Image (tube, helix red, strand yellow):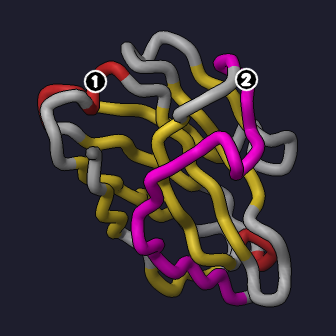
Amino acid sequence: QVQLVESGGGLVQAGGSLRLSCAASGRTFSIYTMGWFRQAPGKVRDFVALISSTGGRTYYADSVKGRFTISRDNAKNTVYLQMNSLKPEDTAVYYCAVQRSGGFFTTGVDDYGPWGQGTQVTVSS
């Protein structure tokens, strides 16, 4: 069972940048497609980005396309989310998760798990 720990969140002004990390335990990390999701207060958990097991394919939500970049380092068992040009509406708890079912473009939360504990990102205007 893969265990995930997110880090790198914080408070940043609009237009700023943050890089989130998701460290995974377990020797099978490199075989999984990984995803980033976010959940704002009072809202459902939404898909942000996903990356294939080798890192060769990525897919983004329209709301972050061109601003966020997902990447991974399988030697370090880590997936990253570089977030640039942040907006107040990006404020949320960000989670990483393993894609456990569905095809590569699967973005529903029910097809992902286990989840990390999340890291808070707050963007001030």
- Identify the residue position indicated by label 1 in the image: 30
- Residue 101 location, x and y as percent? 61, 29
**Residue position marked by numbered label 2 in the rendering:** 105
Amino acid type assigned to the residue bearing label 1 in the image: Ser
Distance CA(mark 1)–CA(mark 2): 18 Å
- Residue at screen point 56% across, 54% down: 83
Q: Is residue 21 left or right of residue 51?
A: left
Residue shown at the point (51%, 86%) measured from the top left: 11
- Tell me where residue 43 appears, x and y as whole percent: 84, 78
- In the rendered structure, the answer to whether residue 74 lies left or right of residue 18 reads left
Placement of the C terminus among the 4 image quadrants: bottom right
Find numbered disc 1 in the image and state the secondary structure of the residue it sits on.
helix
Whether the magenta-drawn stretch holds residue 97 is answered as no
Above or below, 2 relative to 118: above
Q: Position of residue 85 (x, y in %)?
A: 67, 58
**Which quadrant of the structure image shows residue 112?**
top right
Residue interval drawn in magenta: 103-124
Which of 124 and 118 lies nearest the eye of the viewer? 118
Graded by Cα atoms within 10 Å as few (under 14), some (14 to 19) or many (20 or more), the crowding at tag 2 reads: some
Tell me the quarter of the picture where residue 7 sits.
bottom left
Residue at point 59%, 34% (across, down): 50
Secondary structure beneath label 2: loop
| Amino acid on which the number 2 mark rests in the picture | Phe
Specify few, some or many for label 1: CA neighbours under 10 Å numbering under 14, 14-19, or 20 or more.
many
- Above or below, comparing residue 118 to residue 56 in the picture: below
Quadrant where the N terminus is found in the figure = top left
Count all numbered tags in the image, as a single digit. 2
* Residue drawn where x is 46% and y is 59% of the image: 115
